[in-house]
Image (tube, rainbow, N blue to C red):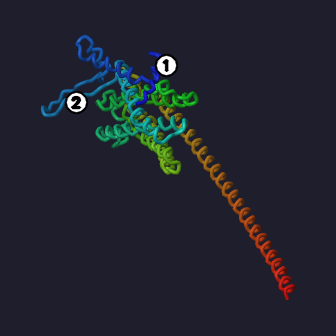
Amino acid sequence: MGLRKKTKSPPVLSHEFVIQNHADIVSCFAMVFLLGLMFEVTAKIAVSFVTVQYNITFPTTDEKAEQATLYHYGFKDVATVFFYTLIAIILHAILQEYVLDKINRRMHFSKTKHSKFNESGQLGTFYLVSFIWGTCILASEKYATYPTNLWESYPHTQMPFQVKFFYIAQLAYWLHGLPELYFQKTRKEDIPRQLLYTALYIFHIAGAYILNLNRFGLVLLVLHYFVEFLFHISRLFYFSDEKKEKGFTVWALLFVVTRLLTLSLSVLTFGFGLAGAENQGLDLAAGNFNILAVRISALTCICLTQAYMMWKFVNFQLKRWKDHAQLNSLKKKAGNTKSKTARKGENREHWRRVLSNGMDVRFEAHRGVKQSIKIYILR
């Protein structure tokens, strides 16, 4: 038996050691909070990290009916978001190691495709889970049944458990993307782009959560996540086979429709619904932010974000069309070159045959003259 080569492990607490073992390290930190629930001394602190806080239970007159429990937000939510950020890092590492890395080894992608495939694999999975989760909440709470549900009885300070936990999970996931830039050894040229869209997600989700626009934000997130899921799943299929580009066409159509729906719902909510509501005024204690300055600021942020996304979309489509045009021109040039080469080859073959036939004729004529002379001499 041959001896196995021992691979040297990096020094403890070095950069390479932390990157290779970051999932185990983060798991240990998360385990500390879970173990804290087992002891009475630390249970009160650990509960703030693990469970959803600020619940309100409403008694019911009917004995058979269950008591309604709703939630509002507070400063302790920061601790909960931090804990679930650790969980998001662990889930990211599990998906990367047990699914995406195995596919990468089989497909033998280049370095550029390797990083893009990992990004689309992670984001595509998150968008799919969030879309299904958000759709179930909309169906159960009936927020999307009528547009008036987006602004009626504002401020929406009291949320069901699923709505609050959805927002905490969203903030935790996008916050986990910041340390992942270090853990995944993201290329320097990709860092500004990923920082930008991560910051935009955190800003808009946190804004909807703090301004008590959780219903409105939930509807927009479900629409946006569905379109983004189509883009990343189309990119995954494209990496497996570059001929599969039909998914990008479907995504392009739905992308434009989603941007129009987002702008329409935003103008309808801030320009008509909240503007015509009776409870106008700023009341921080009651969670009411329905004033003109807040409405204009929120609407402006949404419009600017949608305009930026459309600008990126147009540039993406123009670059894609340009690449297709260059590829088609190269194919035509290659076809013309092949046809010219084939024609030259045919001409050379033709003249070679002509010349060879001519030599054969001359040889036969010469042979005939010699034969006739020989017969004449014999006679």
Q: Residues within 10 Å of mark 1 (few under 14, many from 20)?
A: few
| Disc 2, SS | strand
Residue 20, placed above or below residue 150: above
Q: Farthest top residue?
A: 41
Q: Nearer the viewer, residue 134 or 68?
A: 134
Q: How many marks?
A: 2
**Distance between the Cα atoms at labels 1 and 2?**
49 Å
Q: Which mark is residue 239?
A: none
In this rendering, does residue 207 appear at all? Answer: no
Q: What amino acid type is highlighted by mark number 1?
A: His
Residue at the far bottom in the pictured view: 379
80 above or below 275? above
Spot occupied by residue 167 in the image (x, y as percentages of width and height): 37, 29
Q: Which amino acid type corresponds to the residue marked 2 in the rendered image?
A: Ala
Task: For the N terminus, give its image quadrant.
Answer: top left
Question: Measuring 27% from the left and 12% from the top, which residue is drawn there?
Answer: 42
What's the residue at 77%, 68% (across, down)? 351
Q: Vertical placement of 346 versus 14: above or below? A: below
Eye-nearest disc, 1 or 2: 1
Disc 2 marks which residue? Answer: 68
Please provide percent x and percent y for residue 98. Answer: 39, 34
Q: Dot 2: few (<14), some (14–19), or many (≥20) neighbours within 10 Å? A: few
Give me the residue at 76% from left, 67% from top: 352
* Residue 260 place in picture, x, y as percent: 49, 43
Q: Is residue 347 left or right of residue 237?
A: right
The answer to which of marks 1 and 2 sits earlier in the sequence is 1
Q: Is residue 159 visible?
A: yes
Q: Nearer the viewer, residue 216 or 163?
A: 163
As rendered, which of 122 and 2 lies closer to the eye?
Answer: 2
Q: Is residue 325 above or below residue 229?
A: below
The residue singled out by tag 1 in the image is 15
For the C terminus, the quadrant is bottom right
